Amino acid sequence: MQVLKNANGRGVLLSMVAGIQENKQYLGEVDGLIGDGDHGMNMNKGFTIYAEKLGEGETSFSDGLSDLGAVLLGKIGGSMGPIYGTLFMGMAEEAEGRDQIDLPLFTRMLEAGIRELYDIIDARPGDKTLVDTLHPAFEALKAAGVAGKDFRAALEDMSTGAKSGMESTKDMVAKYGRSARLGERSRGVLDAGAVSCRIILTSMATGIIKEMESNRA
């Protein structure tokens, strides 16, 4: 059975950090089309602060998610800090005290994070936000488990669902955030939060797969 040892979270967290750092400029460009253009800068700031705090130390996946969430809550302005902080800390709480993370547990982690997030935001699928990436990614992950796929295949399906969800925001009209004031003029552009969410989920999946394969070798 494919599992991620919870104690081996460092590589996964740093994969997420790298995903944001490498896409800082792109996220700013996307956000600048219908927003204030600071999404890449703010996300990079929070993830880089977390990486510097981690330093050369080790971390479990659950502790790393909790610590990253706390940094984002405290260091990123606007709505994205609370949104991602709540998501990550909700995921972390579900896995707290667990030695191994398998597909069913990871699915519950993502579900718990979404549930916590829904408690603080009104946005739902179709509103042109990161939820439009997060929801189809979770549904793809859950469907993979029901279909009997292994953890790696399910993570790949999650990444595919995240990409499709992100791309769907291009045809939507923004209902929340600064871009909502543009109405129909917000159509035709990707939502920056949906883009960063896709980067995070894909980087997370890549990190987990790499960690599982290195442990198997």
Image (cartoon, helix red, strand yellow):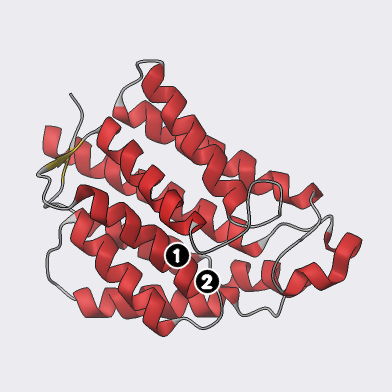
Q: Residue 147 location in percent, x, y?
A: 41, 15
Task: Using the rendered image of the protein, determine whether residue 217 is visible from the camera's viewpoint.
Answer: no
Q: Is residue 145 above or below residue 197?
A: above
Q: Name the residue located 60 percent from the left edge and 56 percent from the top edge.
A: 194
Label 1 and label 2: CA atoms lie apart by: 6 Å
Which quadrant holds the C terminus? top left
Question: In the rendered image, which quarter is residue 162 located in?
Answer: top right
Task: Using the rendered image of the protein, determine whether residue 210 is visible from the camera's viewpoint.
Answer: yes
Residues marked 1 and 2 touching at CB (< 8 Å): yes
Which residue appears farthest toward the front when viewing the image? 119
Question: In the rendered image, which quarter is residue 1 located in?
Answer: top left
- What label does residue 116 carry, if any? none
Q: Which residue is mark 2?
A: 80
Q: Is residue 96 above or below residue 59?
A: above
Front residue of this view, candidates 204 and 26: 204
Q: Amino acid at mark 2?
A: Met
Q: Is residue 67 left or right of residue 186?
A: left
Q: Name the residue located 55 percent from the left edge and 36 percent from the top edge.
A: 161
Q: Amino acid at mark 1?
A: Tyr
Q: Which residue is mark 1?
A: 84
Q: Is residue 1 above or below residue 141?
A: above
Q: Residue 42 location in percent, x, y?
A: 51, 79
Pointer 1: residues within 10 angstroms few (<14), some, or many (20+)?
many
- Element at badge 2? helix
Front residue of this view, candidates 200 and 91: 91
Q: Is residue 36 left or right of residue 111?
A: right
Q: Residue 93 location in percent, x, y?
A: 25, 55
